Amino acid sequence: MLENKGEIAKIVSAVLLPQLGGFVNGKSTRSQITSWYNYLKFPSFKPPNWLFGPVWATLYSSMGYASYLVYKAGGGFSGPARVPLILYGTQLALNWAWTPIFFGMHELKWSAVEIVALTGSVAATGIAFYGVDKLAGYLFIPYFAWCAFATVLNYSIYKLNTPNPSTATIEEITDDSKQK
């Protein structure tokens, strides 16, 4: 199966690359969990906090391995794997960008916009990967499903934590100002 140690090193590198970004983001958000995140309002379907780490570690491993499969089957960056690997890099950058937007800047609205872009790029990457290596495409299905779920969760958190605009009519506001 594996011809040499060089092939093992490529697999390990491909799997570790997404893990690295996840690790850095995880370290940078720890303080935000207790000081900010836990004070937000959440929908009833939010998973427990402890679940996010193992889910992301698994997804990062599978996407990394999928990128290796595409790289190998598609002849590297100069063959048919070129565009799928560019898409992979794009979705990985979007993946890593979400955490600082949500946890670092506390931008619930913009993190919701960003995660829609991420989910779309994950779908595009999975489809492109499938065209080069079927297993690689299949490995993106759980990742896409999780991102779709995370999109709904992010949007729900945004809606639950955004003050409702006034429902008063112009007449009510005008009448109130006349009475003062």
Image (tube, rainbow, N blue to C red):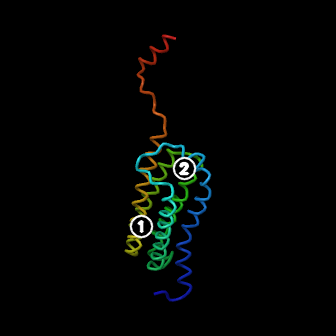
Horizontal and vertical percent position of residue 92: 51, 63
- Residue at screen point 44% across, 60% down: 121
Q: What element carries label 1?
A: helix
Whether 38 is drawn above or below 149: the answer is: above
Report the amino acid beneath label 2.
Phe
Task: Provide the residue designation for mark 1.
Answer: 140
Report the amino acid beneath label 1.
Phe
- Residue at screen point 45% across, 41% down: 159
Image quadrant where one finds the N terminus: bottom left
Q: How far apart are marks 1 and 2 (CA)?
A: 23 Å
Please rate how many residues cluster around mark 2, counting C-alpha atoms within 10 Å: few if below 14, some from 14 to 19, many from 20.
many
Task: Provide the residue designation for mark 2.
Answer: 102
Q: What element carries label 2?
A: helix
Number of numbered callouts drawn: 2
- Residue at screen point 44% across, 75% down: 80
Q: Toward the viewer: 80 or 5?
A: 5
